[in-house]
Image (cartoon, helix red, strand yellow):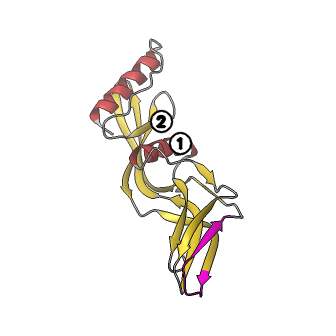
Amino acid sequence: MTSTTRRRLASTALLLALGIGTPVALAAPASATSCTALSASVSACSKVTSVQATSFKVAYRDSAINRTGSSISFTCTASSTTSASHTVSATVEAAVKASILAEFKASVTSGVSASMSTTYGSSTTVNVPAKSTRYCTYGIYVPKVSGNTSYDAYSAGRHTHIKTVTWTSTAPQRLGWQVTTTPI
């Protein structure tokens, strides 16, 4: 958490404690840290520190084996559904998980959602060359990130660091087909 954010939170907490202020939503600092007020004097600020590879949650598989001497066109159609949801390490308090998803969206892409289901009936058409096989796999792309959440207390103009928790998080980013020459 930046010193500017700490000062803003401290001054807001002091005004609230004295009864002369109203809660004000703070703009996200340039470092894209997402903060959540857990009480009038305690805040939790989350920040993504690394983005790992995106995994692919398979919902449906199809394939075409072309044993002829000419190429063919094949339409892969998803005929089942699956879903994926936002998950955060169990060490993180429930009140902070929305803050982590907000920071995840800011750091990865605005397309990240808390949960997603595949669309029943989605299809894609592929060209299958002579004497070859094409595999169609439909699913949900799920990025994985790591970060930390800093819990801090502000009272009477004083700052006290409570703890820092490191976490990992996943959330679905988009639906899509993968067409490959080997099975996934």
Q: Report the magenta residues as a range.
A: 65-78
Disc marking residue 98:
1
Q: Secondary structure at mark 2?
A: strand
Disc marking residue 124:
none
The one nearer the camera, 86 or 97, is 86
- Residue that protrudes farthest toward the top in the picture: 20
In this view of the protein, can residue 171 be seen by the observer?
A: no
Quarter occupied by the C terminus: bottom right
**Residue at the image position 33 percent from the left and 34 percent from the top:** 29
Q: Secondary structure at mark 1?
A: helix
Question: Which image quadrant is residue 27 in?
Answer: top left
**Residue at the image position 59 percent from the left and 87 percent from the top:** 68
Question: Comparing marks 2 and 1, which lies closer to the viewer?
Answer: 1
Alpha carbon separation for disc pair 2 and 1: 9 Å
The one nearer the camera, 180 or 67, is 67
- Residue that protrudes farthest toward the front in the picture: 70
The one nearer the camera, 158 or 124, is 124
- Residue 183 picture location, percent across and down: 55, 79
Residue count near mark 1 (Cα–Cα under 10 Å), binned few <14, some 14–19, many ≥20: some
User: Relative to 20, is 171 above or below?
Assistant: below
- Residue that protrudes farthest toward the left in the picture: 3
Question: Label 2, on which residue?
Answer: 36
Q: What's the amino acid at mark 2?
A: Thr
Does the residue at mark 2 contact the one at mark 1 (Cβ under 8 Å)?
yes
User: Relative to 173, is 102 above or below?
Assistant: above
**Residue at the image position 36 percent from the left and 40 percent from the top:** 32
Question: Which image quadrant is residue 64 in?
Answer: bottom right
**Which of marks 1 and 2 precedes in the sequence?**
2
Residue count near mark 2 (Cα–Cα under 10 Å), binned few <14, some 14–19, many ≥20: some
**Residue at the image position 57 percent from the left and 48 percent from the top:** 114
Answer whether residue 160 is magenta in the image.
no
